[in-house]
Image (cartoon, rainbow, N blue to C red):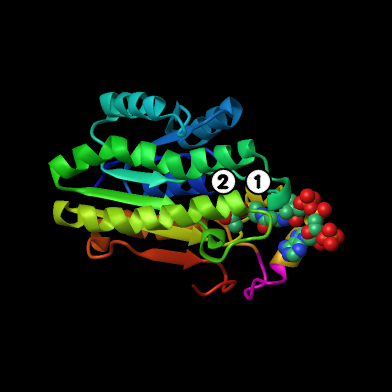
């Protein structure tokens, strides 16, 4: 059954793979993005998926953005919180800006988006919320106090909302990708990246589509008994 789905950060990387996979599953998909107009245009040209530009760290922008999506496409029944950023630095060098921007997008952004679809999902008695956390929210990572804290926060958020949404037909789950071949991971210095890949038992980075398939399953009607869960897709790098 086709439903209206929003994927934040849905024009590049893991988000783009998720948006495409939800479209293939028959859903009506809106992909949001924060700044890269060129990538968004290319994405729409290639996929036919509509894009909406707003900053997930801004509550009012999310409210207006979701209203725009709902005005064009109908009530949002599936939300995939995927938008995320890094600003890596060892803690002694990390600035308040690096802390606030990462928490603002990766954690407050998840609040801002979910809060603006939650009431409608409760009223209609159906919803699917999936948040893309990270292996580094599960295990911590040198140079990522901000990112790991935001992604660990996403897991606490997910479990809490799972308990609050269950009686209203809303499932809330998380996916924790390991290191996936995206721009974000390619930004890590090559030497550090090689060392990370050497710690992945399957011997390679993951592909965005491998995360998208987890999300497609979790938002499907078949997954109605799964809530508060975390799927770890990390090539065996970490067993939480
Ligand atoms: N473990 C232990 N020590 C480490 C280390 C590690 N992983 N990485 C660096 N160090 C040490 C260095 O050896 C160095 O030690 P000395 O001072 O004794 O020589 C010290 O830390 C400082 O190193 P640098 O001078 O290189 O520090 P820097 O200011 O340049 O910052 C860094 C280093 C930015 C943290 C860099 O190491 C880095 O980018 N690390 C990768 C972090 C990472 O994994 N990010 C993931 C991005 S992808 C993502 O987040 C997606 C996802 O969900 C998985």
Q: Is residue 60 left or right of residue 34?
A: left
Asked if residue 103 is among those painted magenta in the image, a careful observer would answer no
Let me know if residue 81 appears in the view. Answer: yes
Q: Is residue 218 left or right of residue 182?
A: left
Q: CA distance from mark 2 to mark 1?
A: 7 Å
What is the secondary structure assignment of the residue under circle 1? helix
The picture places residue 60, in percent across and down from the top left corner, at 37, 25
Q: Is mark 2 within 8 Å of ligand 1?
A: no
Q: Kindly identify which numbered label has been placed on residue 203.
A: none
The one nearer the camera, 217 or 145, is 145
The picture places residue 219, in percent across and down from the top left corner, at 31, 54
The one nearer the camera, 199 or 96, is 96
Residue that appears at 72% across and 50% down:
92
Q: Kindly identify which numbered label has been placed on residue 13.
A: 2
Residue 28: quadrant of the picture: top left
Residue that appears at 52% across and 49% down:
14
Residue 81: quadrant of the picture: top left
What is the secondary structure assignment of the residue under circle 2? helix
Q: Earlier in the sequence, mark 2 or mark 1?
A: 2
Q: Is residue 69 left or right of residue 121?
A: right
Q: Is residue 38 above or below residue 222?
A: above
- Stretch in magenta: 197-204
The image shows a total of numbered marks equal to 2
Q: Residue furthest front?
A: 92
Q: Residue furthest right?
A: 191
Tag 2 and tag 1, C-beta contact below 8 Å? yes
- Provide the residue designation for mark 1: 183
Q: Main secondary structure of the magenta part?
A: loop
């Amino acid at each position: 059954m086709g439903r209206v789905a929003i994927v934040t950060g849905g024009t590049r990387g893991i988000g783009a793979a998720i948006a495409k996979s939800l479209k293939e599953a028959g859903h009506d998909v809106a992909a949001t993005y924060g700044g890269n107009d060129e990538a968004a245009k290319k994405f729409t040209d290639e996929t036919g998926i509509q894009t909406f530009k707003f900053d997930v760290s801004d509550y009012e922008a999310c409210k207006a953005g979701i209203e725009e999506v709902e005005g064009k496409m109908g009530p949002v029944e599936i939300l995939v919180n995927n938008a995320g950023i890094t600003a890596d630095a060892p803690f002694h060098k990390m600035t308040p800006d690096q802390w606030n921007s990462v928490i603002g997008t990766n954690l407050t952004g998840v609040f801002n988006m979910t809060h603006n679809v939650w009431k409608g999902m409760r009223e209609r008695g159906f919803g699917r919320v999936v948040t893309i956390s990270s292996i580094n929210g599960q295990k911590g990572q040198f140079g990522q106090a901000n990112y790991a804290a935001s992604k660990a926060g996403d897991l606490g958020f997910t479990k809490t909302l799972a308990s609050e949404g269950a009686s209203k037909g809303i499932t809330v789950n998380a996916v924790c990708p390991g290191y996936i071949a995206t721009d974000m991971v390619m930004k890590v210095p090559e030497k550090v990246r090689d060392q990370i890949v050497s710690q992945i038992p399957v011997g390679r980075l993951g592909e965005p589509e491998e995360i998208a398939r987890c999300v497609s399953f979790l938002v499907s009607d078949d997954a109605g008994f799964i809530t508060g869960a975390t799927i770890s897709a990390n090539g065996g790098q970490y067993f939480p």
